[in-house]
Image (cartoon, grey):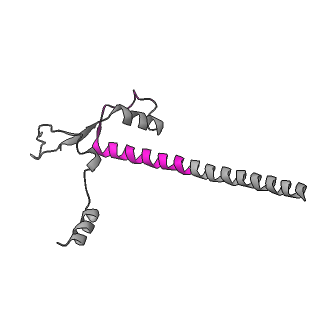
């Protein structure tokens, strides 16, 4: 496999486990319970320990009312979903602040130009 093909293939393969949580995954395997049909009905779930900083992030994003409401352990999928929600909300806040900054710079520039034209008229 050539280098460009290998590089492209690493982006196109679906990755079921996020790399950012792979070091924190705790595999809690429950004993397989036999149902009436004789097959295993439960699958192991991967849990992630939620740090205090992530709890604060979830509270700031409005996903939980307080840090005490946030659970100590979350499944990998719910943690990823909550991080995505936080990321989207943070980007919306940043976009809003950028638009506000752009509008304020336009207003300030217009005021500076008006002051300069007024001084120019007084001088003439």
Note whether 92 is above or below 49 in the view shown. Answer: below
Q: Left or right: where does residue 28 sit relative to residue 90?
A: left
Q: Position of residue 60 (x, y in %)?
A: 47, 36
Q: Residue 38's image quarter?
A: top left
Q: Main secondary structure of the magenta part?
A: helix
Q: Farthest left residue?
A: 38
Q: Quadrant of the N terminus?
A: bottom left
Q: Position of residue 82 (x, y in %)?
A: 38, 43
Q: Residue 56's image quarter?
A: top left
- Residue occupying image coordinates x 71% and y 50%: 108
Q: Position of residue 39 (x, y in %)?
A: 11, 47
Q: Is residue 86 magenta?
A: yes
Q: Which residue range is magenta in the image?
A: 66-95
Note whether 120 is above or below 1 in the view shown. Answer: above
Note whether 64 is above or below 12 in the view shown. Answer: above
Q: Left or right: where does residue 104 sit relative to residue 34?
A: right
Q: Is residue 91 magenta?
A: yes
Residue 118 or 20: which is nearer the viewer?
118
Residue 65 or 58: which is nearer the viewer?
58
Q: Farthest front residue?
A: 123
- Residue occupying image coordinates x 82% and y 57%: 117
Q: Farthest top residue?
A: 68
Q: Residue 32's image quarter?
A: top left
Residue 115 or 108: which is nearer the viewer?
115
Q: Position of residue 100 (x, y in %)?
A: 62, 49
């Amino acid at each position: 496999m050539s280098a460009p093909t290998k590089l492209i293939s690493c982006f196109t393969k679906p990755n079921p486990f996020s790399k950012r949580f792979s070091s924190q995954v705790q595999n809690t395997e429950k004993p397989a319970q036999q149902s009436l049909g004789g097959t295993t009905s439960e699958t192991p779930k991967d849990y992630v320990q939620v740090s205090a900083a992530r709890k604060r992030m979830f509270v700031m994003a409005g996903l939980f009312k307080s840090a005490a409401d946030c659970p100590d352990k979350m499944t990998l999928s719910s943690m990823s979903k909550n991080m995505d929600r936080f990321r989207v909300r943070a980007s919306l806040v940043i976009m809003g602040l950028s638009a506000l900054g752009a509008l304020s710079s336009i207003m300030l520039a217009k005021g500076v130009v008006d002051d300069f034209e007024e001084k120019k008229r007084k001088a003439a």
